[in-house]
Image: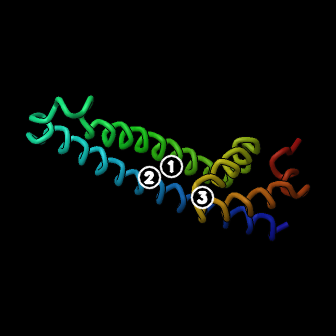
Amino acid sequence: MNNIHHNLSTFRILFLVKGIFTLCFSIFFIIYACIGIIIRNTDEWSQEADSFPFNPGLIFIVIGVIGFLISMVMGILTIMTSKYLKEEKNYNFIFVMAILNCLTGVLGILLGVFTLIELTKPEVKQLFFKA
């Protein structure tokens, strides 16, 4: 039984680290949006307004804002997953977040796959669904 708790606590720490990395990564999207603001306010683009139907800086701003929001939400949800692993509750939330983390790069794939393997063990399910 201690082995199960040891694995869940390891995954808890890894989800916490992954969530913090994801939140830190959102800074790059802020920088990306700032580059778009700089491009948009450049005099060159305002003088050549007839050659482009829109200012290319707008693309940078939109991608930066959307990327920032997505990475912030994923970071917060990943940290919440860490909290729920510690408390051994919200099995379905942890399961879904493990699947979503598989979409977020190599660290997310490894963390998600090993978490899914651990969560499907009957003795781990029993921890979450205590009667």
Quadrant of image for the N terminus:
bottom right
For mark 3, give the secondary structure: helix
Q: Amino acid at mark 2?
A: Leu
Residue drawn at (61%, 54%) of the image: 82
Q: Amino acid at mark 1?
A: Gly
What is the C-alpha distance between the residues marked 1 and 2?
A: 5 Å
Viewer-closest of 11 and 70: 70
Viewer-closest of 2 and 65: 65
What is the C-alpha distance between the residues marked 2 and 3?
A: 12 Å
**Contact (CB < 8 A) between labels 1 and 2?**
yes
Does 5 sit left or right of 36 as displayed? right
Of the numbered discs 1 and 2, the one sitting upstream in the chain is 2
Of the numbered discs 2 and 3, the one sitting upstream in the chain is 3
Q: Which residue reaches farthest front?
A: 51
Please provide percent x and percent y for residue 47: 9, 35
Please provide percent x and percent y for residue 107: 59, 64
- Determine which of the numbered discs, if any, sits on residue 91 in the image: none
- Determine which of the numbered discs, if any, sits on residue 15 in the image: 3
For mark 2, give the secondary structure: helix
- Determine which of the numbered discs, if any, sits on residue 75 in the image: 1
Residue to which mark 2 is pinned: 23
Q: How is the image coloured?
A: rainbow
